Image (cartoon, rainbow, N blue to C red):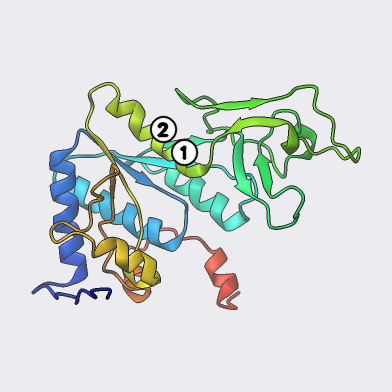
Amino acid sequence: MVKIRKKHFLEKNVYEAAKERLVKIFNNYDKVVVNFSAGKDSTALLYLAIEVAKEINKLPVEVLAVDHEIEGKGTIALWEAVHAMPEVDMKFYSLPMALRNACSLQYPIWISRHPAEKDLWVRDIPSYALTELENFVFEYDENYEHPDGLPFKAGGVKKAMSFQDIADTYINNYRSKGITAIALVGLRASESLARFTVMTRKHNECYISSNLPLAYPIYDWTAADVWKYIRETGLPYNTEYDILNNKE
């Protein structure tokens, strides 16, 4: 029989609890990196990290963002806005990356920023993007030809990293040099049973992963908490959410 753990409520609101977690994290790690997708959760997490870092003199906040090539205008605009913030040290990587392809059964993997497909790229690499990362891996057959004569080169790729591989490599590059580092992720327990399960495996400090250098400071926030906080900051958000909500 599976044992279901019950929720235990704190005598504080989620905002106060998350700030306390972030203070502890900033004080216990040499490098604290916010994984920033420009989604609502990572946006709220980033702004909260900036707020805490300012209070404890830990600015600028280090941010990791990765270009998937196919992001919309709202995402791109938010990346640019965050990159320009003086409180942020943003590392924005535009690298060949393996992504799941839902448009083909024959080729389930699509390679963004494939160096042999520059004429097919959805958009150019941003001027502020980084195109090299220590220990990054991407190998492909330069002589590969698509069997149907199509211009796509994914079938010739021998080794490619995913987004998570890139994020892990970024943190591990610090750790390999003896620098304690951890990535902050805007994962919330209320999003799914699987995520709730991840958070309830540990009895103490469930917001810090037990086997990976990851922390989830806003794990107990609801979507309403996230949007309330973003609204109260008055800072930019991803306007693609307005489209989803049928706003002009």
Numbered badge on residue 165: 1
- Residue 54 appears at what percent x and percent y? 20, 46
Q: Are marks 1 and 2 in contact (CB under 8 Å)?
A: yes
Q: Nearer the viewer, residue 17 or 237?
A: 17
Measured in 3D between alpha carbons, the distance from the residue under mark 1 to the one under mark 2, in whole angstroms, is 6 Å
- Residue 227 visible, this orientation: no
Q: Quadrant of the N terminus?
A: bottom left
Q: Residues within 10 Å of mark 1 (few under 14, many from 20)?
A: some
Q: Looking at the image, is 33 positioned above or below residue 224? A: above
Report the residue at 15% width, 49% height from top: 23
Give the residue drawn at x 70%, y 42%: 123
Say what secondary structure mark 2 lies in.
helix
Occupied quadrant, residue 125: top right
In this figure, which residue is indicated by the disc labeled 2?
169
Classify 10 Å Cα crowding around label 2: few (below 14), some (14-19), many (20 and above): some
x then y, percent, for residue 95: 58, 33
- Residue appearing at x 54%, y 36% in the figure: 161
Vertical order, 209 against 93 (above or below): below
